Image (cartoon, helix red, strand yellow):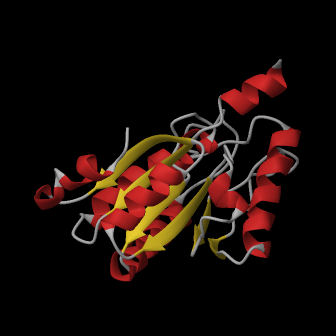
């Protein structure tokens, strides 16, 4: 039953970042959306589609800065930003996705696999935030739900390309878009519901 249920409930949420979006606002929102609850929630955002290299570079730089400030450790310490993953098998599964992303050619910008935690907790299932750039639609980390603290950035040239990626994804679920008010009507016209 649980195997059948896991196939039914696979999800892959996307965020789209337009070139004129407020990158600081997007970084702040993505930190919670991608890494909050260790990414172990159905509405986590594991994929960011950056429309244009300039905004892609800016969001990567902003995320790197914020990830460096994160504190990972036991959930009993309220000063931590992120606790452990739920089980050892899930921890191993998420690490395997990170390994897969590297093997398939995505750029691992931030590697949380070797995160250091407070003494006495070294054997916990801790994985720091992982950030990939140059993720491609054929990669396993793009296609499958990771359900962990891993964010992949996909780069496209146009909003139309971004919407097509989302429409074509087998497990498309939720989408958010960071944009200026100038583009407010365009995404809904391009998204097939």
User: Does the image show residue 193?
Assistant: yes
Q: Residue furthest top?
A: 1
Q: How many marks?
A: 0
Q: Nearer the viewer, residue 133 or 121?
A: 133
Q: In the picture, which quadrant includes the C terminus?
A: top left
Q: Residue at x 55, y 57 (%)?
A: 70
Residue at the image point whose x is 81% and y is 51% from the top: 119
Q: Is residue 186 left or right of residue 39?
A: left
Left or right: 139, with 62 as reference point: right
Q: Position of residue 69 (x, y in %)?
A: 51, 62
Q: Residue at x 46, y 50 (%)?
A: 167
Q: Nearer the viewer, residue 159 or 30?
A: 159
Quadrant assignment, res 8? top right
Where is the N terminus found, in terms of image quarters?
top right
Q: Is residue 164 above or below residue 60?
A: above
State which quadrant residue 3 falls in: top right
- The percent coordinates of residue 41 (x first, y second) are 59, 34
Q: Is residue 174 left or right of residue 134?
A: left
Front-most of residues 190 and 12: 190
Q: Residue at x 47, y 46 (%)?
A: 33
| Residue 87, percent from left and from top | 82, 36
Image vertical order of residue 157 relative to residue 190, above or below: below
Tell me if 177 is positioned left or right of 118 in this view. left
User: In the rendering, at what x and y percent does residue 175 appear?
Assistant: 41, 45
Residue 173, relative to residue 9: is it above or below? below
Residue 114 in sight in this render? no
Asked where in the image residue 25 lies, by quadrant, the reply is: bottom left
């Amino acid at each position: 039953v649980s195997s059948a249920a896991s196939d039914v409930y696979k999800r892959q949420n996307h965020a789209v970042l337009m070139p004129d979006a407020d990158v600081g606002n997007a970084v702040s929102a993505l930190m919670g959306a991608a890494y909050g609850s260790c990414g172990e929630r159905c509405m986590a955002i594991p994929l960011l589609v950056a429309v244009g290299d300039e905004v892609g570079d800016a969001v990567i730089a902003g995320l790197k800065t914020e990830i460096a400030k994160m504190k990972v450790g036991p959930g009993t310490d309220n000063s931590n930003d992120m606790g452990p993953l739920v089980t050892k098998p899930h921890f191993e599964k998420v690490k395997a996705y990170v390994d897969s992303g590297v093997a398939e050619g995505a750029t691992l910008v931030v590697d949380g696999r070797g995160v250091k935690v407070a003494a006495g907790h070294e054997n916990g299932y801790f994985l720091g935030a992982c950030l990939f750039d140059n993720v491609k639609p054929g990669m396993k980390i793009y296609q499958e739900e990771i359900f962990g603290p891993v964010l992949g950035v996909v780069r496209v040239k146009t909003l139309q390309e971004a919407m097509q990626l989302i429409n074509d994804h087998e497990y498309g679920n939720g989408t958010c878009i960071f944009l200026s008010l100038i583009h407010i009507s365009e995404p809904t016209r391009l998204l097939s519901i």
